Image: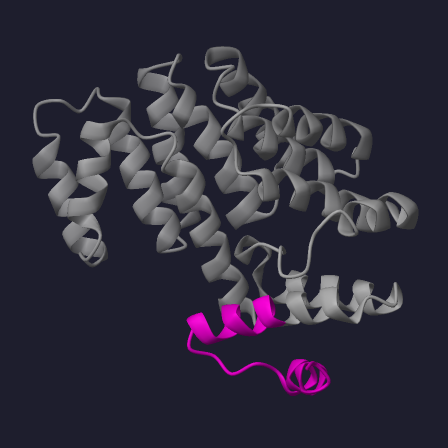
Amino acid sequence: MKKILFLFAILFTLQLNAQLIPDKYSAIMEEMWTMNFKEKLKFLDKKFKGNINDPWYYWFKADVYSMKEDDVNARLCYEKAIEVDPKFAAGNGSYARYLVSYVHTDFEKAIELSSKAIELDPKEFNYYLDRADAYLQLKQFNKAIADAQYYLEQEDVMVFAGQLMLINCYIEMDDQEKLKELLMSFEVGQIDFMAGPVMASRIGDYYISYNEPERACGAYRVAAENYELLEGESPAELQKKLANCK
């Protein structure tokens, strides 16, 4: 289960990073995609040879180290990226996201970094979700909700990402009224893949409690598809729930 959650964290992070990386750096990421850990580091050293003051060099290395779960070097590289360019919004924002999504600690620092990223690039709305996530972890729910709602008010954003943040807030707050209102706004099968297998299944359970079996089955199917994508068999409990779906 831990591996599945980790993989979904990677998928979610990549979806957000895709909106942050300029084209010429996206090409570098594509070139590295199939390389192993050591190959990626050598490739980056060669690619940025003579240009080590480019903050993206350290940003890429931080990303590589984070995938290797090398927290010490990942942090050092993020720190170096924003040291060589204090106005590097993506460095601040990605560092914040790393602390929340991978390290699961230093949430106050993540808020500071996200806030700096927002100051530097207020139109990169994903930074608001990063900060909302840190606020959520600190149980500062009103601030988390405010950031998520601001994100949802913008154009061309991943709507379900903002909605998922609100779902998590309402669950943690035990605000069943607002949670039900939000979940009932979705049509059957509208629960997004981004929810991941655990949350999708949990949402299905909420629908059952609302006496909404069709919506529940839609959520359970999303959960099962997520497990299948990751080449993992759905848990027996989920299979039993799906057996009751028509």
What is the quadrant of residue 154 in the picture?
top right
* 203 relative to 78 in the view: left or right: right
Magenta span contains residue 236: yes
> Looking at the picture, how far across and down is residue 180, in whole percent?
85, 51
Residue 80 or residue 20, whichever sits in front:
20
> Looking at the picture, how far across and down is residue 232, in whole percent?
47, 79
* Residue at the (14%, 53%) spot, across then down: 39
Q: Main secondary structure of the magenta part?
A: helix
Magenta extent: 221-246
Q: Is residue 214 above or below residue 57?
A: below
Residue 36 or residue 244, whichever sits in front:
244
Picture quarter with the C terminus: bottom right
* Residue at the (34%, 25%) spot, across then down: 81
> Looking at the picture, how far across and down is residue 38, in whole percent?
18, 54
Please count the marks in the image.
Answer: 0
Magenta span contains residue 1: no
Picture quarter with the N terminus: bottom right
